[in-house]
Image (tube, rainbow, N blue to C red):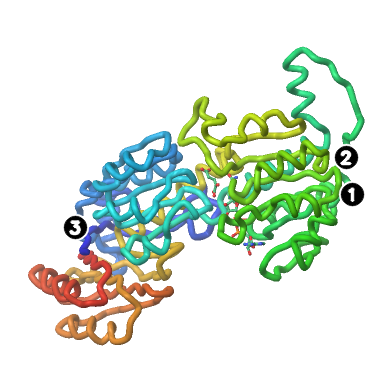
Amino acid sequence: MSSPINISAPGKVSYSSLSVSPSATFHSPPASQGQSFMASNLAHRAAPKHLKPFNTEDIKILLLENVNQTGQDILKGQGYQVEFQKASLPEDQLIEKIRDVHVIGIRSKTKLTAKVLAEAKNLLVVGCFCIGTNQVDLDYAAKHGIAVFNSPFANSRSVAELVIAEIITLARQLGDRSNEMHRGTWNKVSNKCWEIRGKTLGIVGYGHIGSQLSVLAEAMGMVVIYYDVVTLMAIGSARQVPSLDDLLQQADFVTLHVPETPETKNMISAKQFEKMKSGAYLINASRGTVVDIPALIKASRAGKIAGAALDVFPNEPAGNGDYFNAELNTWGDDLRSLSNLILTPHIGGSTEEAQRAIGVEVADALVRYINQGITLGSVNLPEVNMRSLTLDEPNHARIIYIHRNVPGVLRKVNEILADHNVDKQISDSKGDIAYLMADVSAVKPEDIKDIRDNLDALSSRVLTRILY
Ligand SMILES: NC(=O)C1=CN([C@@H]2O[C@H](COP(=O)(O)OP(=O)(O)OC[C@H]3O[C@@H](n4cnc5c(N)ncnc54)[C@H](O)[C@@H]3O)[C@@H](O)[C@H]2O)C=CC1
Ligand SMILES: O=C(O)CCC(=O)C(=O)O
């Protein structure tokens, strides 16, 4: 399939104060700044080229799940058509909408399955305005030339801070005391209320969030142990333990920070609750599938665990409202009846700081990809970067050829480009898919069609884009 649009825009490196991620800071100026940007740079030999045709208004973007204003502003600033919705969409409505768009921006709820993506004939790129990408069929997307970007750690600190709050809240039974006071009941007790100083925190998954949490927990006087499938450097005095069972047997608080994968499904179930210390606490701010909720209900009723905090659930509502009911999850009422249980609506990453930073980071990545074909930060395509074309290169074109990673492709591509001077060329692969970018000079407008047709005719082709 060929992209229906030759997408292009001026490129520029700029640094934004909003983003916490180094890769978040590289973005093109708004299309509306194109003229003055160009004028002020005409004198410079290496000024980025205003690629043509400049049809940014042809780019249709659908943003779901209340993507932050920062992201919306960057995309609208490019002149793209941006449609914004607060909630996610059920599959049938999503399929209707996705047929028409070149870009979709989502958070954790929108399921971009192979079935949905198969209908997205114009889709170039997906922006996950969050960390997790388990909601997207990444393999299907890559095989159909659809790039996927996320924000790998802009909300990690927010999740870690939430977990610290939950550890103290559980240890002091603050949720129950507060609920009682709301009902007019004064219940001043110290029975089974604890300081967290000296208690052991067991972190399952010592990645961005787990390791950030480790630092905060030690500062509060906790002893930190962690379990991870990878051997990882301990931060501070934390200590890696060899197995999940080891962690469960030692920890007073168990907190989960693993991705949703087949291996992490029901990672904490009846057997694991058995292994936990009596009176321990469980916190899950990772994904709802990681904890077997009926087993948690049993362990809590049996007094095996003294409390739990859940931020994520196997089935979560598409938007805000009175939807967290037994219809959504059959065990809903049983869960709600437990004491010392904190329930939050997937707000681990929901802070102003995190959402603003994510908005900038993902929108910048989308602009870079749409306008220049750069895949830095992509989670499903090889990461390829190339400097912008400049004003000194008026008859250049940027060829982007996403293809199956099979022998002989480069030879065939270079045969097609043989009559042009290839100024620069980069190719990289990830699994079955490879990404080639080449800037060629002395390209006449009529050459563009020939190059595209010839590339499209190759059996290895997944997607051809030409920016000029
Ligand atoms: N509640 C919320 O709002 C948020 C939830 N999340 C969830 O938290 C998860 C973790 O986030 P990060 O720390 O940024 O991810 P990360 O990728 O930096 O770290 C995950 C760690 O888990 C480890 N791991 C993977 N499979 C494992 C297994 N079977 N057993 C033990 N360790 C395993 C990995 O080796 C890695 O060190 C995300 O995948 C996402 O699902 C992320 C952000 C916000
Ligand atoms: O804030 C969100 O919508 C999702 C947060 C999350 O779970 C993630 O970043 O993976």
- Residue type at mark 2: give it: Glu
The spot of residue 126 in percent (x, y) is 38, 53
Q: Name the residue under label 1.
A: 198
The spot of residue 342 in percent (x, y) is 70, 34
Asked if 248 appears above or below 389 in the picture, the reply is above
Within-10-Å neighbours for mark 3: few <14, some 14–19, many 20+? some
Secondary structure of residue under mark 1: loop
Within-10-Å neighbours for mark 2: few <14, some 14–19, many 20+? few
Q: Mark 3 points at which residue?
A: 4
- Do the residues bearing badges 1 and 2 touch, measured as CB atoms within 8 Å? yes
The spot of residue 56 in percent (x, y) is 24, 50
Q: Mark 2 points at which residue?
A: 195
Q: Which of 57 and 269 is in front in this view?
A: 269
Asked if 186 appears above or below 344 in the picture, the reply is above
The spot of residue 13 in percent (x, y) is 40, 59
Using the numbered discs, state the Cα–Cα distance from disc 3 to disc 2 in whole angstroms: 61 Å
Res 445 label: none
Using the numbered discs, state the Cα–Cα distance from disc 1 to disc 2 in whole angstroms: 8 Å
Secondary structure of residue under mark 2: loop
